[in-house]
Image (tube, coloured by chain):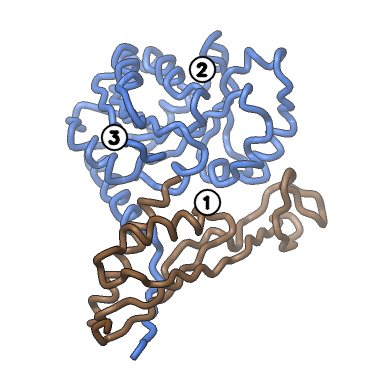
């Protein structure tokens, strides 16, 4: 005889529980952590490369890089001054999840660091749905991607705590309507702090780094 | 794109609840999927057939109940369905809305059988 059993369980529950465990570990070690998300080529690794030298002597930083393959990004983070750098190869998965971050945390001596930079897999869809346990979610948009991205990827834009708009040095060369872009962002995520910047020229980077340091201090 | 991980999670939830109920077979699974959830029904179905093989949930039918997206304007409190290309309130033109529904993604119920399949 067939019987209906009510379940009512969120499908991502298991991931969310592990994310909470990751957060507890980070808190216990007084490590502030951010989850950097963006589409491929928006400049996640470049932002890390530009951010690390500016944090030198102010925060001790570890980096975790998620990619489908290769350790190119972790190598770049290490070269830019990360105190430790762990590469997670997702082997085809389109996002990092809490289990993968837990594996990376196991490889780090968290007591040695103040800040953990987690670079997610380049993707504007899936990383939004999988919480990692990091303290803040940061999205890096970039001018050549186009101004319609908030409208096309609302899940990503509405869930972040800060938005970097990279490659603003290209504004004169591409048709990117900043007003239209910002209106979409504001609709989804009212009042979210934004940092227009260019990793190539260095413009705007100090404001972002100051904010990051301030956030880490408040958390610590 | 991440439907494999999601489907594995569904299977875990289903098997745990079926076991608790002492079920011998799972006939159907009722899923709730919000319009704003990025998971694709067809992909979940595709992976399901592969990963549920040789479990008591093999052959279970997946039912998807879609929940439409609904936003509420935080200026005039009008509730509306988001259109494409613009995300402003259709009544007052304000930006800034709260999501009322559309993000659901859960297992709502399972239909189980206490008899061995014949």
Chain assignment, label 3: A
Q: Chain of mark 1?
A: B
Q: Is residue A220 visible?
A: no
Q: In the structure shown, which secondary structural element does the residue marked by tag 3 occupy?
A: loop
Disc 3 residue crowd, few under 14, some 14–19, many 20+, Cα 10 Å: many
Left or right: residue B53 versus residue A7 is left
A79 w.r.t. A5: above or below: above
Say which of marks 3 and 1 sits in front.
1
- The image quadrant where one finds the C terminus of chain A is top left
- A195 relative to A19, above or below: above
Relative to residue B7, is residue A49 depicted above or below?
above
Marks 3/2: CA–CA distance: 22 Å
* Numbered circle sitting on residue A31: 3
Q: In this structure image, what is the colour of chain A?
A: blue
The residue at which mark 1 appears reads as B38
Given residues A158 and B58, the one toward you in this image is B58
């Amino acid at each position: 005889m067939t019987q209906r059993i009510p379940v009512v369980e969120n499908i991502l529950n298991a991931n969310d529980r592990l994310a909470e465990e990751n957060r507890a570990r980070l808190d216990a070690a007084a490590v502030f952590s951010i989850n950097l998300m963006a589409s491929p080529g928006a400049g996640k690794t470049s932002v890390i490369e530009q951010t690390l030298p500016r944090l030198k002597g102010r925060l001790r930083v570890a980096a975790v890089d998620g990619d489908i393959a290769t350790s190119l990004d972790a190598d770049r983070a290490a070269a830019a001054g990360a105190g430790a750098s762990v590469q997670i190869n997702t082997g085809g998965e389109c996002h990092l999840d809490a289990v993968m971050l837990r594996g990376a945390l196991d490889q780090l001596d968290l007591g040695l660091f103040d800040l953990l930079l987690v670079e997610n897999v380049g993707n504007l869809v899936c990383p939004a749905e999988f919480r990692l346990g990091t303290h803040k979610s940061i999205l890096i948009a970039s001018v050549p991607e186009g101004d319609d991205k908030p409208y096309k990827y609302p899940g990503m834009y509405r869930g972040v705590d800060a938005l970097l708009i990279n490659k603003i040095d290209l504004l004169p060369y591409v048709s990117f309507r900043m007003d239209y872009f910002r209106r979409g962002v504001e609709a989804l995520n009212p009042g979210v702090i934004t940092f227009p910047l260019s990793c190539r020229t260095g413009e705007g980077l100090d404001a972002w780094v100051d904010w990051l340091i301030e956030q880490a201090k408040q958390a610590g | 794109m991440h439907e494999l991980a999601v489907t594995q999670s569904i299977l875990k939830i289903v098997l745990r609840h079926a076991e608790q109920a002492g079920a011998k077979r799972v006939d159907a699974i009722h899923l709730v999927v919000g319009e704003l959830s990025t998971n694709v029904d067809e992909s979940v179905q595709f992976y399901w057939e592969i990963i549920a093989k040789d479990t008591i949930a093999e052959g279970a039918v997946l039912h998807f109940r879609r929940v439409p997206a609904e936003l509420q304007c935080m200026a005039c409190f009008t509730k509306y369905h988001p259109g494409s290309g613009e995300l402003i309130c259709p009544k007052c033109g304000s930006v800034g809305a709260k999501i009322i529904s559309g993000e659901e993604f859960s297992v709502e119920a399972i239909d189980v059988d206490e008899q061995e399949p014949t």
